[in-house]
Image (cartoon, helix red, strand yellow):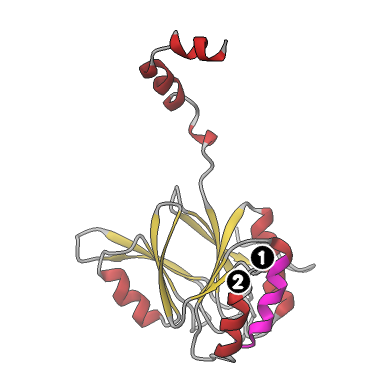
Amino acid sequence: MVSGLYRCIPVRRLLAALYACPTDRFASMKICILSDSHDNRTLLEAAVRDAKAAGAEAILHCGDVVAPSTLEVLKPYNLPAHVIHGNNTGDLYMMGLIAAKLSNRTTYYGQDAGIELGGKRIFMVHYPHYAEAMATTGDWDLVCCGHDHKADIRSIRNMSGNSTLLVNPGTVGGIKAPATWVLGDLDKMLFKIQTVCTNDTQNIA
């Protein structure tokens, strides 16, 4: 009976019906971008908790995790985490061991990484000057960095004559600056700086 139904509906009509569906049928991918946690488990976990509640499907950590064991707080949220190291490297051998665990959803790349998520080409590096240089190449849709603990989102003119988005989420560990992270929508390419929510803080409007 089902096969007969498919025989009486032309393929072109099935395709037309599929593409006529509302665009929100296919949820856009949201990501949590953060950096410079500097062993602060409490603030890191709070950021990831809020990110998952907002629909984030992946975490990008742009370096200065320091102690690899800090990443254990991510486990309850079951999100894939893409991690690089910064100038405060911590125990890189242990970082590799943690990432190698079959039960772990963390991927550790080293000092930088080129990945693809949600159909977008993303480059991660700790240092802002390196990130800005990579943004100018035009090879990436999004470049993410950290290091200076200054949350910033801006467009960089690239060599192809277009613009590449450069995102610095600041320091999620709250080191000499407010504890911040960035929630990004890869389909709309919209990114927003968030403060880590505690009893006395709210998201930046």
Marks 2 and 1 sit apart, C-alpha to C-alpha, by 11 Å
Please tell me how crowded label 1 is: few (under 14), some (14-19), or many (20+) other residues with Cα within 10 Å: many
Q: Where does label 1 land, which residue?
A: 48
Furthest-right residue in view? 199
Residue name at image x 68 percent, y 81 percent: 70
Furthest-left residue in view? 160
Residue 153 position (above or below residue 15): below
Is residue 70 toward the left or the right of residue 64 in the image?
right
> Which callout, 2 or 1, points at the residue further toward the start of the chain?
1
Tell me which amino acid carries mark 1: Val
Q: Position of residue 163 (x, y in %)?
A: 29, 60
Please tell me how crowded label 2 is: few (under 14), some (14-19), or many (20+) other residues with Cα within 10 Å: many
Q: Which residues are magenta?
A: 66-75
Q: Position of residue 187 (x, y in %)?
A: 45, 48
Badge 2 element: strand
Badge 1 element: helix
Which quarter of the figure has residue 154? bottom left
Report if residue 72 lies within the magenta region. yes
Residue name at image x 69 percent, y 54 percent: 53
Residue 57 position (above or below residue 126): above
Judge by depth and name the residue closer to the eye, 114 or 152.
Answer: 114
Judge by depth and name the residue closer to the eye, 37 or 5.
Answer: 5
Q: Where does label 2 land, which residue?
A: 180
Judge by depth and name the residue closer to the eye, 64 or 93.
Answer: 93
Which quarter of the figure has residue 1? top right
Residue name at image x 51 percent, y 73 percent: 151
